[in-house]
Image: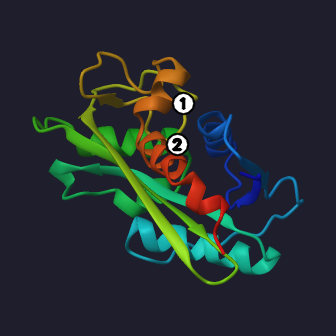
Amino acid sequence: MTDIKILLASQNEHKIKEFRAIIKDTQISLITLKDLNDQDEVEETELTFVKNALIKAKYFSKKYHIPAISDDSGICVNALGGKPGVHSKRYANGNDYDNNIKLLNALKDVKDRHAYFFAAIVIYFPDCTYKVYEGEVHGTIGHEIKKIDAFGYDSVFYPNGYDQTFSELDPKLKNEISHRGQALKKVKEDLFEIINHK
């Protein structure tokens, strides 16, 4: 098997770090937008994680004529009817800390704190075909922020079976059990087809 270069369609340093950690020791060579000095932002206008990931992967694959990989992910809370969902990043129109505060306030005095992280990963090829990989991890929302500078909602989410939030777990363990980790595991299982895509 030969290596394949895939462009990661994300400006998010946390996501880049996670992707690289999870797919290391594979035949995938990740190129980032930062490597290309590309500051383009693609607006996520769709109502599903898969369609939002597809928008980004398609745009950058067509721009550079190479396969592009993108993910859209977020947290869905039962008591809030699945919100913030695809609006997770923009939930409070601020930073991650603001989002966490808004979520905790929304769940004040709420007993059902079940939630799940969902990730959709799309690899888009120059021939206009694409592959979709999904992952999710269930857990509960805590009552306080455990780590101020944590990524996304990691500081308030306790995955089932653990008494620590994502932000407190060892990064290697978190990558193994996370929604993105689950989806990327499926990417790795499909590696032969991806690399030999015609």
Mark 2 secondary-structure assignment = helix
Q: Position of residue 131 (x, y in %)?
A: 50, 68
Q: Position of residue 136 (x, y in %)?
A: 34, 46
Q: Position of residue 43 (x, y in %)?
A: 60, 74
122 versus 186 height, above or below:
below
Which numbered disc, 1 or 2, marks the residue closer to the eye? 1
Residue occupying image coordinates x 49% and y 48%? 189
The residue most toward the bottom is 128
> Which of 116 and 18 lies nearest the eye of the viewer?
18
The residue most toward the front is 1
Q: How many marks?
A: 2
Q: Which residue is label 2 attached to?
A: 96
Q: In the rendered structure, which disc, 1 or 2, sits on the residue that comes first in sequence?
A: 2
Dividing the picture into quarters, in which one does residue 133 lie? bottom left
Residue occupying image coordinates x 34% and y 25%? 144
Residue occupying image coordinates x 52% and y 67%? 53
Q: Which residue is label 1 attached to?
A: 150
Mark 1–mark 2 contact, CB under 8 Å? yes
What residue type is disc 1 on?
A: Ala
Between marks 1 and 2, how big is the CA–CA gap?
Answer: 8 Å
Question: Circle 2: is it few (<14), some (14-19), or many (20+) Cα within 10 Å?
Answer: many
Q: Is residue 105 visible?
A: yes
Residue occupying image coordinates x 63% and y 77%? 58
Q: Position of residue 68 (x, y in %)?
A: 68, 66
148 versus 30 height, above or below:
above
What residue type is disc 2 on?
A: Asp
> Which of 14 and 125 lies nearest the eye of the viewer?
125
Dividing the picture into quarters, in which one does residue 92 lie? bottom left
The residue most toward the left is 111
Q: Is residue 141 left or right of residue 196?
A: left
